[in-house]
Each structure stands twice: as structure tokens, then as C-alpha cells.
Image: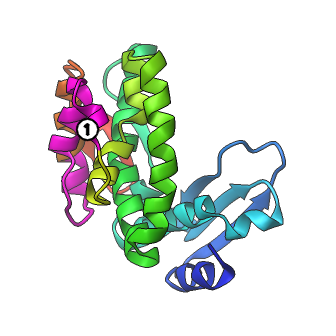
Amino acid sequence: MGKENIKLLMAELEWEVEIIKDPKVQIFNIITKSQEKRHIIRIRKEEDKEDLNFAHELIHAYLAEKVAPVFGVGGFKSEQKPTEEDMFRIYHIVGSVVEYFVEMKLIQFLGKEVMREKYMEGLEVIKSILSMDQSEKSMLLIMDAVPIMRDLGLDISFADPYIILLKVSEIIQPAEPSLEILEEYSNSLLKVFGLSVELKVSPKEITIV
């Protein structure tokens, strides 16, 4: 995607960005330490700084600074004791909403064509997954892509047979990212998956009540 685009994204950030190279890293990830005004991004190698996934992590950092640290990525605390299975559901539900806002902001920075190319490749992967596995776990892992593809103008008719994917597309709609919207969309998705808990979103963490 080019060094210039990365420079433009970096220029939008006010806090320190620490980049750690770790060959064992499988998925780029970010930790935001808001009290220190610092982002820590883990990548595999120097060339990864020009990768679209690195730009994605920079957008997490951008939203953490401009909206709230929880976007960069926040932790959970619980007043209950959810099962391991329910925590998996909650983690991916909240993650889907956060990822939507991150990718939408990335589209604003890079343009639709760059992102359409990425998601056109992802579309075939998702179709392949659904042809082999229609479990709830698969839905949780792929559902974040559906509203993004919709907003990019891609054909999401592959989702038609799956109530969960249709509900995700119905609930997650274009909006300016905020704590209120993150809480609203996440709690609506919890109901889709039959979870009776509720989430309270604060600037730095999400509480399960």
C-alpha cells in the first residue's frame, strides 16, 4: 500500500508508537497504554510496515486517541462469571463492531478501491469456509466482514441463508464511532446469539453485567 500512505496515517497520531518486530507474531496486534500515551504494535519484520494490516493497527491507534482508548483495543471485566464459550462469543461480538469502525475509517484514508480489492479476495475465502462449516463459531469468526463488504458495494448474497449474518448486517450500520454506538451495537448482537448478559462500555474497558 506504500510508505506514503503509512506516513500520512502516522502523522495523524499524537501519541508515541512503539513497533516491536517479532518473527513469531502470526497476527499483527496493538496495545494502547493511554496513561502513557503510547501504542505498542507487534509486527513480524520491517517490510510489514507497508502492509495493509499494519495500517489497520494504526487506525486502532487513531480511534483510541480520537474516540476512546477502548478502540485500541480495550480489556474486559465482569461482574459475572461467563463460561469460556460465552466469553468467546462476547469477545468476537465486540471485536466485530470495533473492526467495522476501524475498517470504515481505513476506507476514508485509503479509498474504496484499495479496500474493495482486499475484500474481494476475502469474499472467496468466506464462501469457502461456509461451504464446509456453518457452525456458530464460523459465523463469529467471519461476521465482521459482512457489513464492511455491504458498504463497499460487494455482493453479500452469500449471507442470505444465514440468519446470524443477516442480523449482523442489519444491526451494524454506518455511524460515527462512539462509546454509545459500540455499546448499542454490541448489546444488540448479544441478543442475536441468545446471551442474557449486557455490556457497559467505558473509555478504557468493557464491563459484562
Q: Residue at x 17, y 26 (%)?
A: 191
User: Is 118 in front, or is 89?
Assistant: 118
Q: Position of residue 128 (x, y in %)?
A: 49, 28
Residue 73 among magenta residues: no
Q: Residue at x 34, y 51 (%)?
A: 149
Q: Residue at x 62, y 84 (%)?
A: 7
Instruction: Indicate the quadrant where residue 136 lies.
Output: top left
User: Is 176 in front, or is 65?
Assistant: 176
Applied colour scheme: rainbow
User: Is 168 in front, or is 33?
Assistant: 168
Viewed as shown, does residue 38 lie left or right of 143?
right
Residue 209 in sight: no
Viewed as shown, does residue 40 lie left or right of 206?
right
Image height check: is 110 above or below 146? below
Image height check: is 99 above or below 40? above
Stretch of the chain drawn in magenta: 156-183
Q: Position of residue 140 (x, y in %)?
A: 39, 29
| Quadrant occupied by the C terminus | top left
- Which residue position holds label 1? 157
Instruction: Indicate the quadrant where residue 6 lies.
Output: bottom right
Q: Callout 1, which amino acid?
A: Ser
Q: Position of residue 133 (x, y in %)?
A: 45, 16
Instruction: Indicate the quadrant where residue 55 lies.
Output: bottom right
Q: Residue at x 32, y 20 (%)?
A: 80
Mark 1 surroundings: few (<14), some (14-19) or many (≥20) residues within 10 A: few
Residue 174 in sight: yes
Viewed as shown, does residue 13 lie left or right of 2?
left
Viewed as shown, does residue 138 lie left or right of 194?
right
| Quadrant occupied by the N terminus | bottom right
Classified by dominant secondary structure, the portion drawn in magenta counts as helix
Q: Position of residue 95 (x, y in %)?
A: 40, 42
SS assignment at label 1 = helix
